[in-house]
Image (cartoon, rainbow, N blue to C red):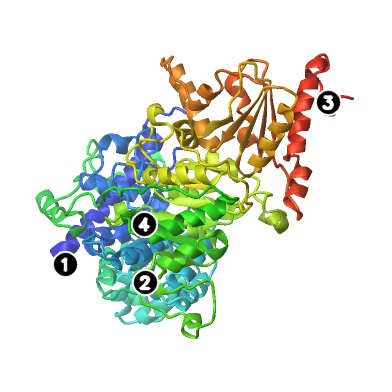
Amino acid sequence: MSADLTHLKTVEQRLLWLSHWMIHNANHLRPKVDGIKIGGHQASSASMVSIMTALYFSALRPEDRVAVKPHASPIFHAMQYLMGNQTREKMENFRGFGGVQSYPSRTKDIDDVDFSTGSVGLGVAITSFASLIQDYVAAKDWGRGAPMGRMVALVGDAELDEGNIYEALQEGWKNDLRNTWWIIDYNRQSLDGIVREGLFERIEKIFDAFGWDVVRIKHGVLQRAAFEEPGGDRLRDWIDACPNQEYSALTFMGGAVWRKRLMDDLGDQGDVTALIERRSDAELAALMENLGGNCVETMAETFAAIDHDRPTCFLAYTIKGWGTPIAGHKDNHGGLMNKAQFADWQKHMGVEPGEEWEPMAAVQDRAALRDFLSQVPFFAKGTRRYQDDKLAVPSIAIDTSREISTQMAFGKILDDLSKGDSTLADRIVTTSPDVTGTTSLGPWVNRRKLFARTAQADAFIENRIPSTAKWEFTPKGQHIELGIAEMNLMLLLGAAGLSHSLFGKRLIPIGTVYDPFVARGLDALNYACYQDARFILVGTPSGVTLAPEGGAHQSVGSPLIGMSQDGLASFEPAFADELAVIMEWAFDYVQRDGEGDPDERTWLRDETGGSVYLRLTTNPIEQPGKRVDEDFRQGAIDGAYWLRKPGPNCEVVIAYQGAVAPEAIKAAGVIGEGRRDVGVLAVTSADRLNAGWTAAQRARSRGNAQAQSHIETLMAGLPPHCKLVTVIDGHPASLSWLGAVQGHRTIPLGVEHFGQTGTIQDLYGHHGIDAAAIVEKVNGLTAGKHLSQNRLSPLHNS
C-alpha cells in the first residue's frame, strides 16, 4: 500500500470520527435548552466520507469549486477542522447559535465554502451555471483571472427527484457544458424509504442524452479482488442482482446474517462456499460493505482517470451509515447512535476518552500525517476566494419629455449604455428565460450580441431576411440565452453574481422575467440571495396593468416578495427619471462589500450592498418633466419623496407605488378642487421604507433615542387628524403599514384577487385602484368623522 493511500485511509477515519462526534456531542452531551433533537445526519455523512476524502485530499486543485451535499455538512466541517480552518468552539456549538451551520454556508460559516447548500437540488444545479460563467469570463479579454477549474457537486441520490436538476441538464447541453462533475452518493435510501429498483438506469439515460459521461463505481478493491477468486463471478452476480432493500437490511444485521444468506443462496457450489468460509464474520461484512463509493482507493483512482473536460456524472454506490452501528437501517436518515452504541463505536475507532476533539486522535504517525496534509494541493493556497475592483458607474439620464413606460425606459437606459465604452457596460451580462425581446432587452442584445464559446451564424442575417432581432452568437457576446425555466434564470444570476469571488472578475448580471413568474423561480432566487450573489432582477411587465393578458399573467403578490426577500432591495418606480436614478444607484449597490451580516447601523444594507429587484410595467404614462433636486434623487433611492407636499393642516395623503401614479395624481387634483389640503407621497420602494422603519425602532429600543427612519421624517409633520389612502397595482398590504408609522387612519387599496382580461381602466375600476375609487374612499373617510358612534363594518353587523 502506497504512503499516500495509507494517509487517505487515515484521513477517512478521522473525518468519520470527528463528524460523528460533533453530532453526538450536540445531541447527547451539550446542555439541552429546547428539549428537542438537534439532528445532524450521521448516516448521510458516513456514506460520503470516502468520496470526500478522495476528492478533497487527492483529486481537487485550488481552482476547483464544490457544492457539498447538504447532509454531508458535518464531513465538510470536520475536514476544515482537521486542516486548521475551523475552530473547536464552533464545532462544539454545531447547529447552535454562532456555531458551524447545519448546511455549508458562504455567509454564515468561517470555513472555505464555495456554494451554500441546503435546499436540495439547487447546489447541484448551480455548478453547471458556474461552469458556464467561468467560460464566459475566460472568453473575454479582461486580463488574468482565476485558473480554469472544475465545478463539482456532491449529490444525494434523493436530490435527483428535484425537477430543477433536469432543467439545468437541458440548459447545460444547449450551452456546451464542460468542466462539471456531479458525484452521486448512491446509497439508495431517502428520508421515507428505499429508492425504487431500476430508477438509476432511467436517470443514466437522461444524462447520456444530454451529453454527459456516466461512470459507475459499484465495487471497491476488496470486492474486485474477491471476484478474481474462484467462484467470485457468482458472488458478483449475486451482489448486482440483490434488491436495494435487501442489501440495506443485510448490512444492518451484520456478518453472521450475511453468511447465512449467502450460504442459503450460493452454498454447496464448491468455490463460492470456500470463498465465503475463508472469511470471518467481520471480514465478510467488510467485503459486502466494500462498495465503490465506500472505498477511498477506488474513488481516488476513478477521479484520477478523468483526463477530459466533458461533463461527468459519477454514480458511486455506498452504504448509508457506512462504518457505524446504524449502517443500512431504513430509519437512519434522521437517526442517531445512542450513548451505548456510541461508546462501543468509540472503542472500535480507537479514540481514547478525553481525546474526542483531538484532530490527530488514534493516529500512529502524526508527524507523517501532518506532512501529508501540508502538501494536499487543494488546501495549499489557503482560502480560495478572489476579489475584483469596483467599476465606476457612468451617469445615467433619460429623456422625460414624452410618455414612456418604465419597461421602455429600462430598455432605453441599457441601449444607451451599450452605445458607450464604459468598463461597467463591458461587464454587464444580461439573460432572460425566453422573453428577451418582450422585456425590452432587444436593443442591448442587438448591439452587444449573444454569448457562445464558438461563433454561430444567424441564418436570417445571412439570407438578408428582415428582422428586428439581429442576434449573433460570439465569444464576445454579453447576453446568455436561456430557455423558459425561471429556476435556471435565478441560478444563472446566482452564479454570475458570485463571479468576482469565484473567478476574480466582477460581472454586473441583469436578468429579466415576466413579473408574475418571479414566483416560479422563488426557491432559486432565495438561494442566490442567501449566497450573497449580486445581480439586478427586472420583473416586467407587472400587475393588472398588463390588462389584456388576463389573470395568469398579472402579478399580485410580487411586491410582498420583494419586501420579504433578504438580500434583495426592491423598487417599483412610476417614472423614467426615478428609474434612471435607481439604476445608477443599483449599479454601485451591487458592488459594495458584502462580507458579514448587516447590523442595525446598516439594516438597509447600504454599506454591505446586495441585489436589486425592479418591478416595471408596460403602460406609457405622462412624465413629470425634468427634476434635479436632491430631495427627489435621494428620496427615490431611500424609498419615497413628496410629489405634492402636504400643508400644516393636511386632511388627506395619497401614497402610491408604481404604475398607478396617474390615478393618484388625478384623484389628488379632484380632491384639491374642494380646497382640501392634499399631499401625494410617491413611494418608489416600500421595501426600503419598511426596512428603515423597523431598523429605527430596533435602534431606539436599544437606547439610541435619536434614531429616525426616512419614512418617519417624511410623515413627521402630518397632523393627527390626517387620513392616509395607499394605492398600488399589487397586494394592498405592501403599503398598508404606512399608517402605523405615525398612527394615521389608513385605507389601503390594491389587488387581492386574480384579474381577468380587459382594458387598463376596466381592471383599475374593477379592483378599485382608479382615481374614482380613490376619491370615493377619501370622501368615505371624511364622512366617517360623523359616524364615529358606529364602529362596526357591515360584515360584522347581524
Q: Residue 362, relative to residue 164: is it above or below?
A: above
Q: Quadrant of the N terminus?
A: bottom left
Discs 4/3, front:
4
Secondary structure found at label 4: helix
Q: Of callouts 4 and 2, which one flags the residue occurring earlier in the amino acid sequence?
A: 2
Q: Of callouts 1 and 3, which one flags the residue occurring earlier in the amino acid sequence?
A: 1
The kind of residue on which mark 2 rests is Thr
| Image quadrant where residue 263 sits | bottom left
What is the C-alpha distance between the residues marked 1 and 4?
A: 56 Å
What is the C-alpha distance between the residues marked 4 and 2?
A: 35 Å
What is the C-alpha distance between the residues marked 1 and 2?
A: 28 Å
Residue shown at 49%/37% (left/top)?
A: 636
Which disc, if any, is residue 236?
A: none
Residue at mark 1: 1
Residue 146: x %, y % from top left = 24, 59
Q: Quadrant of the C terminus?
A: top right
Residue 646: x %, y % from top left = 61, 23
Q: Of callouts 4 and 3, which one flags the residue occurring earlier in the amino acid sequence?
A: 4
Discs 1/2, front:
2
Q: Of callouts 1 and 4, which one flags the residue occurring earlier in the amino acid sequence?
A: 1
Residue at mark 3: 796
The kind of residue on which mark 3 rests is His
Secondary structure found at label 2: strand
